[in-house]
Image (cartoon, helix red, strand yellow):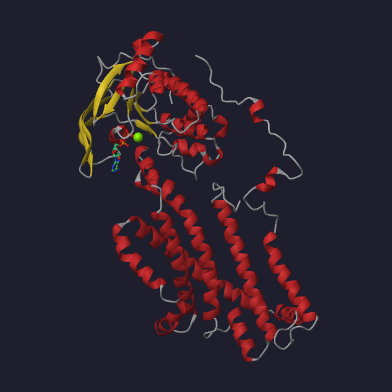
Amino acid sequence: MSLISFTTPASVLQRRPARGSTDARSRSLLPKAPVPLQRLVGPILLLVLWCVASGTGWISPAKMPGPDAVAASLAGMIGSGTLATDIAASLQRAALGLSIGIVAGFALAVAAGLTRLGDALIDGNIQVKRSIPNLALIPLFIIWLGIGETMKIAIIALGTTVPIYINTHAALRGIDRRFVELGQTVSLSRAGFLRHIVFPASLPGFFTGLRLAVTQAWTALVVVETINATSGIGFMITQARIYGQTDVVLVGLLLYGVLGFGSDALVRALERRSLSWRQSLDQ
Amino acid sequence: MAPVARPVSRAAGRSEPPAVRIAGLRRSFEGRTVLDGVDLTIGRGEFVALLGRSGSGKSTILRAVAGLDPDVEGAIEVPERRSVLFQDSRLLPWASVIDNVMLGAHAPDIRERARAALREVELGAKETAWPKTLSGGEQQRVALARSLVRDPELLLADEPFSALDALTRLRMQRLLQRLCQRHAPAVLFVTHDVEEALRLADRIAITAEGRIVHDQPVAAARGNPERLEALRLDILERLGVSGD
Ligand SMILES: Nc1ncnc2c1ncn2[C@@H]1O[C@H](COP(=O)(O)OP(=O)(O)O)[C@@H](O)[C@H]1O
Ligand SMILES: [Mg+2]
């Protein structure tokens, strides 16, 4: 019997050099490969613009203090240690609420996506919750849970559950039937089916939900920290507003920006690692 | 996978019971009858090609035998260990090549066997690759390895090579031939390609109007160009293609 060879003759593989001065690759429809930290270019440009605008006196320091004033008050807050306390308090609330939201959203999505009973009980309720703004629930939550930490974390948790649920559920429902058939032909057990097909297939949706949930967590934080808080970035901003300290307000906004950007980058990195089998624009 | 070659006994099925016995298979979709009493027997280690026009029910028969169609009526006797080869390679994109090969298989030495199966399809070096990075032919070879690692007594294939280019298809046919000689499963191979059927099969069955309308041994004609050509024309004619 003859041995089968799968090598292709080298002549077939030889590439013709691109003609003219343009590189053939530059005509690709895809965006060019990202340079490291390219996403920082936009924010940095904005900072530069701010420096120029306040340096030349385009904007009044009373309405919008310059970078030097903001930097000075930032340094003061770092020195006195209040900044660290506020960031820690905010991070803790966001992390706790987000963690509960992730677990709840994922568990509900699996229950609703894979069982008829779960679908009957859960899906309608989530769709209803989806159309009620989170902030509209605050008065009710204050009556039920008081004005302490529990209420704050419950609001964040509820707000993050929804995007995790919606996107994970959509991915679960969209699983390719051909893979279900494949599972049958290789006699996968129920557990094996979940592990090898259902969970990996729902992971892209889960990550989309996670990115929305992280944003949602920070947004909710701003609001709940204006209610009876004694620490946190939101508290810091509320206090500064009362005393007319525009520079401190800006420090707070800056912090939200940095934390939001940082957490999104973290989730993206996690997503890239977990979904490395995908060859998408993100690679 | 036992590397020990089993002797290929094409005449098997006389002393032993056959690998597959299908009788009176019926299936209709929304009142339209697609299978109307299909009878088919496949001996152990026998390679049967199922030919027929598009829409004549080939895939429906195969899905029924694979156990994928709960609504089919009739008697189906099949061995416990069976594998399915689909037209698309149907690899899980999130699992590495070797994890795809091992999917659902449970033997204690499964990893070793999966490696051996990948070597058999000449993809030993691609063990940890993602399926998306492979060519169409390579993906179908992984699917072949996944089918063989279960050491099937019955291999079911639904036009597995029809999406491949002509050269790759030819290579895949020779690979399948070699692997079938080594592992000797019974094979039910759906194809619309007469040449492929003549090249691979011991027997050719033709479907039309919901039945097997013709059942023809091939092996005897092989090696005799004139008889093979006559057979080819005969089959083409039965499929409704004039022979010129
Ligand atoms: N799930 C289905 N629902 C409705 N009709 C179907 C379904 N599967 C197959 N059919 C019909 O049954 C007939 C036979 O299909 P199939 O077995 O796929 O043919 P073949 O594989 O020989 O081309 C076709 O007319 C097809 O439209
Ligand atoms: Mg078909």
Expressed as whole percent of the image width and height from the top left, the position of residue A49 reads 74, 74
Expressed as whole percent of the image width and height from the top left, the position of residue A81 reads 69, 79
Number of numbered discs on residues:
0
Residue at the bottom extreme?
A: A243
Residue at the right extreme?
A: A56
**Quadrant assignment, res A50:** bottom right
Camera-side residue of B220 and B67? B220
Residue B121 is at least partly visible in this image: no
Q: Where ligand 1 lies, by quadrant?
A: top left
Residue located 44% across and 52% down the image: A199
Expressed as whole percent of the image width and height from the top left, the position of residue A6 reads 56, 25
Residue located 25% across and 26% down the image: B212
Residue located 42% across and 31% down the image: B160
Residue located 58% across and 75% down the image: A90
Q: In this view, does B75 lie to the left or right of A255?
A: left
Height in image: A177 above or below A244?
Answer: above
